[in-house]
Image: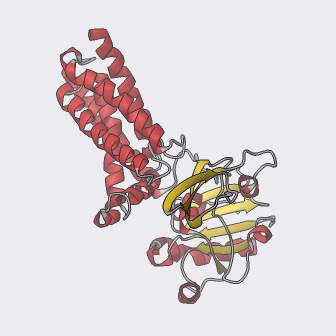
């Protein structure tokens, strides 16, 4: 039993640290995922949406420090029962999401590793198995060092996690796993290769035959049935190839300028998901920065999901010298984890990204 507990201790501890650190690197991204879970249609807890960021920070810090606690043997009973409570909750969450097909990506490993809800549920079941072993064999979990050293390590792990979370929130994620990372080309991310796997759908047709409803499955073609059509439902069997960049656009209500701007040699995109919630301190820096960029020969545009009238009013109130274009809010939150956030491109390739706190250090 002692050896099984030792293996479980290392396996669970390392996995919790890795999973927690990936989310700690991008707490804003994890908060967006929590908002999906809290929203209507999943857990129906909309009152928690405004607190998603605070909850995400607390959860991921707790996840990392529990992994450290387990490895060094700090307060074994508290640690294993906390791990059990956390994994039971997440197992329920991933099962609910998978069974009712509510959230397509669980967010367990952030953008570093995409898992479907069923894959994540399977992962949680495996973790639950090993955590139950730890609960049963908790007496075999001994501290690796003396009491003082273990306590110091536990405290330092908490302080380090808290400091790292603060740093990435005030700047940008230290490691960017997304499709808009520096060096990525947005047009290439949108492209679907000619030989890419095509989506596979199943269509379930309902016809009234001899007074009774009967169902017929096809791959999309209209079935040859001697009966009265009632209804049809579609189901995705295999989504096929999915490009890494989706829903990104640069457009007005009348015209799409995406291709035009992504061909620019020197382009600055100033991104604010929602103009009403953009950080005032960051907005105050935009006029000076955009003036400097224009003098340096850059084309400067703003991107926001806000309405046209709101964009014009915002531009006038802040005396900005660039126009705003429309883009999906979720896509903008993926491009850069700041509002305002700045992205510098050359012919669609991301050259540099900056949080509004770091505008002064951005190279032009």
Above or below for 317 versus 199: below
Q: Can residue 202 be seen in this view?
A: no
Q: Which quadrant would the N terminus be assigned to in this image?
A: top left
Q: In which quarter of the image is residue 331?
A: bottom right
Above or below for 340 versus 81: below
Query: Quick one: which residue is furthest to the front in this view?
Result: 210
Q: Is residue 268 left or right of residue 203?
A: right
The percent position of residue 141, horizontal first and vertical second, equals 23, 18
Q: Can residue 36 be seen in this view?
A: yes
* Residue pictured at 29% horizontal, 23% vertical: 72
The percent position of residue 147, horizontal first and vertical second, equals 19, 22
In the rendered view, how is the structure colored? secondary structure
Total label count?
0
Q: Is residue 322 left or right of residue 274?
A: right
The percent position of residue 213, horizontal first and vertical second, equals 49, 60
Q: Which of 47 and 276 is in front in this view?
A: 47
Above or below for 261 versus 319: above
Q: In this view, does 105 lie to the left or right of 189?
A: left
Q: In this view, does 70 lie to the left or right of 307?
A: left
Q: Which of 120 and 350 is in front in this view?
A: 120
Q: Quadrant of residue 364?
A: bottom right
Above or below for 275 versus 73: below
Q: Nearer the viewer, residue 288 or 117?
A: 117
The percent position of residue 208, horizontal first and vertical second, equals 53, 63
* Residue pictured at 54% horizontal, 40% vertical: 113
* Residue pictured at 36% horizontal, 52% vertical: 56
């Amino acid at each position: 039993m002692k050896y099984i507990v030792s293996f479980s201790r290392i396996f669970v501890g390392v996995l919790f640290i890795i999973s927690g650190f990936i989310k700690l690197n991008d707490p804003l991204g994890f908060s967006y995922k929590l908002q999906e879970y809290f929203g209507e249609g999943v857990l129906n807890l909309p009152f928690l949406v405004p607190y998603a960021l605070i909850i995400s920070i607390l959860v991921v810090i707790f996840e990392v420090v529990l992994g450290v606690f387990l490895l060094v043997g700090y307060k074994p009973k508290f640690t294993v029962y906390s791990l059990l409570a956390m994994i039971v909750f997440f197992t329920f969450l991933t099962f609910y999401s998978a069974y009712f097909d509510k959230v397509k990506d669980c967010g367990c490993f952030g953008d570093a590793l995409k898992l479907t809800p069923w894959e994540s549920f399977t992962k949680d079941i495996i973790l639950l198995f090993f955590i139950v072993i730890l609960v049963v064999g908790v007496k075999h979990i001994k501290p690796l060092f003396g009491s003082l050293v273990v306590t110091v390590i536990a405290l330092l792990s908490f302080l380090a996690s808290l400091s790292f979370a603060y740093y990435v929130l005030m700047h940008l994620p230290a490691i960017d796993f997304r499709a808009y990372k520096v060096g990525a080309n947005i047009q290439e991310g949108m492209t679907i290769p000619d030989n890419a796997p095509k989506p596979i759908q199943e269509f379930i047709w309902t016809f009234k035959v001899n007074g009774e409803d009967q169902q017929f499955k096809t791959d999309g073609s209209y079935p040859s049935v001697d009966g009265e059509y009632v209804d049809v439902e579609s189901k995705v069997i295999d989504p096929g190839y999915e490009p890494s960049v989706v829903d990104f656009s640069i457009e007005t209500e009348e015209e799409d300028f995406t291709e035009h701007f992504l061909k620019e040699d020197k382009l600055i995109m100033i991104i604010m998901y929602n103009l009403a919630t953009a950080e005032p301190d960051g907005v105050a820096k935009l006029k000076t920065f955009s003036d400097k960029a224009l003098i340096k020969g850059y084309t400067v545009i703003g991107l926001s999901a806000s309405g046209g009238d709101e964009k014009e009013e915002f531009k006038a109130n802040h005396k900005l010298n660039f126009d705003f274009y429309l883009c999906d809010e979720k896509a903008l939150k993926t491009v850069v984890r700041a509002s305002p956030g700045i992205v510098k491109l050359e012919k669609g390739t991301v050259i540099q990204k900056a949080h509004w706190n770091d505008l002064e250090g951005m190279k032009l």
